Amino acid sequence: MNSTSPKATPSSSSAARLVPPTTREDLREWVDQIARLTTPDQIHWCDGSMTERQELVDVLVATETLIPLDGELRPNSFLARSAPDDVARVEGRTFICSESESDAGPTNNWCDPAEMRSTLTGLFAGSMRGRTLYVVPFLMGPVGSPVTRVGVEITDSPYVVVSMGTMTRMGRVALDIIEGGADWVQAVHTVGAPLGKGEVDVPWPCNPTKYISHFPETREIWSYGSAYGGNALLGKKAFALRIGSVIARDEGWLAEHMMLVRVTSPEGQVAHIAAAFPSACGKTNFAMMQPTLPGWQVETLGDDIAWMWIDDNGLLRALNPEAGLFGVAPGTSDSTNPVAIQTLWGNTVFTNVALTDDGDVWWEGLTKEKPDHLIDWTGADWTPASKSPAAHPNSRFTVAMDQCTTAASEWSDPRGVVVDAIVFGGRRSDTMPLVTEARSWAHGVYLGATMASERTAAAEGTLGELRRDPFAMSPFTGYNVGEHWAHWLSIGERLRVSGRFPRIFHVNWFRRGDGGEFLWPGFGDNVRVVKWMMDRIRGDIGGVDTPVGTLPHPSDFDLDGLNLSAASANAILSVDAAEIEVDARDSQTLLNLVGSTVPSEIWAENAETIDKCGQ
């Protein structure tokens, strides 16, 4: 094979890019094996340098995959428009290929690994013809952490390489750890669009056929047909959660779909909070909260994924394994998330948002007034009279974590932070209160296991439909979900030795009134909920015992200055026992589906909830 081609790969005289820059024969042989299968025109070993990144960006601009934005309005930033059928994660095409179907559990799509390998071998054969095979070594987690792990993604998409350079610690830093003897997760990706000789490429190559397949026992990921982030950036959901959760189970730690923040009160009390929310349910807003109460500060440690482990002192610690932010654009504005808007000042890749006439970006919710004219996410003219949205509902931004204006200085500390509270939450228009504290660790696991949310654009299904989303991990747990709950319970047993349990809470920012209006203002006022949590952690206040846990006593919850009626306050700070019982019985559908792997403690908590509803 040729090693360079100015039409398809960054040009370079660096020997490290022309020959495998590693002495690891297993890695070299694996790359050669994939190359023989996929038959690329070139092979490029990525070093993660800024020079390499610029060369890749130049290639993407030349192929019109990236559209440069105005350099003064949005420096070093770009817009990408995906194919209309490649706009989100494809849960229905995501598979856990464990040796036993029972190991995948009933909430995952399972396929026999031998059958899937046969299918993928046929699809990947010749799939990179006319393209460059990029070898992308990357780290999940900072150098030196006990939970940091290494991956190598092979891809034929320079868009994926650039994005992986933002979302992970990519290149030589990861290869050096592999050189030191570390194991690595094998991740193979192709857009599934080989090019014939002289064939002109399209800006967003992909394939109508899509597979995102995971092999837990061999720690492999194979992704075919999509270039969308959640399907193609294999360090993210595929490694950090699906394969990561299996590694964590086997090694005794947790890989979870959680944001991570540090909160400091005016008196100097500090708490670290890990919170699990389904996609597009306010997680990024929480991670970048601008508190409305004077003297309070929220610092960002991570917006999407947390890896947690028990340290030598018996304390639960956590860190963010990613290096970038991959956030939902629609609804993000100066009023809802000013930190995100500040973070996106430049050095950002936007996907499927609208383009303004002056070369900037726009999406629904960014401004109160809609521009008179835009180019929408499909490349068509758009005006306020248009029937379709200007930006896709799942349009995204990709930006380095270092650029976040509220990032805590310790966000990449390999020691992580001690977790003081764990929060679960979903988008519920009724039933669940604004905040409740679990009765115990086991009850907290039950709340996480049975949490539900109304579907969003990031999840397949009917918008608004309620679905159970255990731990916000329904699309991401790489093994049987019942065993996941049991693993959480086992973590609790280990924490019992030190007696330092994080407190567990459930929140619901999205209760609606009879007219469909949101009852709680949310956003920066969510610090009022955090304030109550921290008072509980400190032991300063009591609460109201209910079937779903301890709710705030109205006199202990800070509502000063809010335009909130007494009726609305009562609605969000209380529960209807009859509604809770209906919800608890409805959750039994999930528990029965999961079947014999449901821990007895979870059934016991369900029974206690129903029993308390009748008291």
Image (cartoon, grey):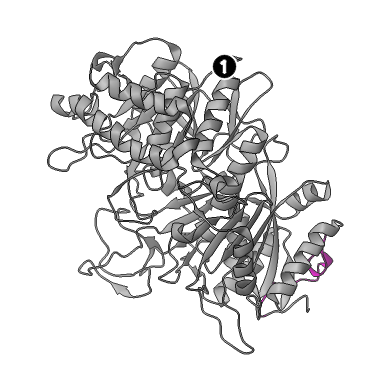
On the picture, is 443 further left or further right than 586?
right
| Disc 1: CA contacts within 10 A as few (<14), some (14-19) or many (>=20) | some
Secondary structure under tag 1 reads: loop
The location of residue 358, given as percent across then percent down, is 38, 68
The kind of residue on which mark 1 rests is Arg
| Placement of 553 over or under 387, stated as above or below | above
| Placement of 412 over or under 465, stated as above or below | above
Q: Which residue is drawn at 39% across and 30% down?
A: 447
Q: Residue furthest front?
A: 596
Please, what is the dominant secondary structure of the magenta stretch? loop
| Residue 28 visible here | yes
| Placement of 195 over or under 226, stated as above or below | below
The location of residue 68, given as percent across then percent down, is 50, 68
Q: Residue at x 60, y 64 (%)?
A: 115
- Which is more toward the observer, 403 or 70? 403
| Residue 548 visible here | no
Q: Quadrant of residue 159?
A: bottom right
The location of residue 199, given as percent across then percent down, is 58, 87
- Which is more toward the observer, 153 or 300? 153
Q: Which residue is drawn at 40% across and 59% down?
A: 395
Q: In which quarter of the image is residue 241?
A: top right
- Which is more toward the observer, 296 or 188? 188
The location of residue 310, given as percent across then percent down, is 63, 26
Q: Give the range drawn in magenta.
A: 7-22
Q: Residue furthest bottom?
A: 198
Rendered-image quadrant of the N terminus:
bottom right
Q: In which quarter of the image is residue 38?
A: bottom right
Rendered-image quadrant of the C terminus:
top left
| Residue that badge 1 annotates | 496
**Does the magenta segment cover residue 188?**
no
- The number of numbered badges drawn on the structure is 1
On the picture, is 33 further left or further right than 430?
right
